[in-house]
Every structure is written in C-alpha cells, then in structure tokens.
Image (cartoon, rainbow, N blue to C red):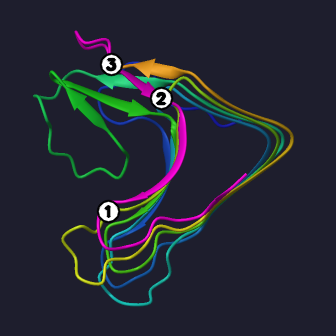
Amino acid sequence: RTTGGNADFSIFPSEIASGATGPAGTGNIIVEAREINLRNAGVITSETESLTPNVQHGSITITAQEMLQISGNAIRTDFPENPQLNDPRPEDSAHGRTIRTSGIFARTSGTNPAGDIEIMAHDLVVTGGARITNDALGFNIENAGSASKILITAENAFTLSGAAPVGDKFGTQLSSIVSSGTQGPGNSGEITI
C-alpha cells in the first residue's frame, strides 16, 4: 500500500519521482501492488527537461491487482503569494496558499516527449481533486517536445469524481481530471480509457 503525505505539509508531500535536466535520460517508474493509495498530495511523477535530442523519456507503469485510489490534496501556507518553486508537481497558488493535488503526472519542458502513463487496475478511483495528466510545457523552446499517451485499463470500474476546495474567499475548487495538454508548439497526447 502506497500512501501520500500529511494533509498540511511544511516541505513537500510524499512522492515517487524520476527526472532529468541534463543530457541524460529520465528513468522509467514501475509500481506493482495489490492495492495502491495516493492521498494527501502523494504523487508519482516523471519529468523530462533535457534539451539534448533523443534521450529517454521515462514512462510510468502502474499495476494494481485490486484497487488504485488517488484522492485528496494538501495546502501549504508558509510561502508568499505566487511562490517560485523548482518543483515538478502541478500547483495552484492563491493568496499565499500553494495547493498540491494527489496524482500521477508526466510532463516535458524540454525538446523530448513526455513519458507515457499506463495504468492497469481492477478498480480505479480518482476523486477529491486528484489528477492524472500528461503535459507539454515547452512554450519558450524551439522544437519543444510533445505530451505522450495516457492508457487506462480498469477491469471492473473506473470512477472519476469530486473536487478539492482551494480555500480562498471565492470558493474555488480544483476538479478531478484525466487530461493531456500543451502550452507550446508540442502536441497534446492521446487518452484511452
């Protein structure tokens, strides 16, 4: 059973991560267990930042014989508004709060594609603002890499529901999502469920 961090965190939440910024490639992540739980901003993430062409972009492969559940978020309040963090996980900052959601994330901000995400489970539950995303963020890079595919196989049931409250005065919420996107010239990836 894999679990995330505390609901309120002072440094960073729990994570399984692979990343590279130099000429070396990003390693693959393979997780296999009967049950896997990512909660309270627990994440599995693969980040490709290298500008060196044709390096390995680490894929994420997760197999849960029974249940994979991704849920919840954490709020960090000890940053000033709009913090500048060298951190691979998605964040949403509002009024001095940094919101981190639980999730599985692959992204590229270099010239190589992001790694694939492949999930196999008997039951998959994504709730409470949790996210599965594969993104291309190389908006200032010529020949920026593309996002890659998300392939989800749930033998019994796949549930996507709920949102996480940000806690600002506007009542903002972060929805649970499965998505692939691009913020630059690279393409978004294919999603198959």
Q: Residues within 10 Å of mark 3 (few under 14, many from 20)?
A: few
Kindly identify the amino acid type of the residue bearing the numbered disc 2. Ser
Residue denoted by label 1: 137
Residue 70 sits in quarter: top right
Disc 3 marks which residue?
Answer: 172
Magenta span contains residue 171: yes
- Looking at the picture, how far across and down is residue 86, in whole percent? 23, 52
Is the residue 103 above or below the residue 185 in the image? above
Q: Is residue 113 left or right of residue 78?
A: right
> Which quadrant holds the N terminus?
top right
**What label does residue 175 carry, if any?**
2
Residue 52's x, y, as percent?
33, 87
| Element at label 1 | loop
Instruction: For marks 3 and 2, give the CA distance.
Output: 10 Å
Q: Are marks 1 and 3 in contact (CB under 8 Å)?
A: no
In the rendered structure, does residue 144 fall within the stretch colored magenta?
no
| 126 relative position to 129: left or right | right
The residue segment tinted magenta is 167-193
What residue appears at the point 50 percent right and 26 percent down from the top-left corner? Answer: 40
Residue 158 place in picture, x, y as percent = 76, 36
- From the viewer's perspective, is residue 167 above or below residue 175? above
Mark 2: which secondary structure? strand
Q: Nearer the viewer, residue 131 or 97?
A: 131
- Amino acid type, callout 3: Thr
Three-letter residue code for mark 1: Leu
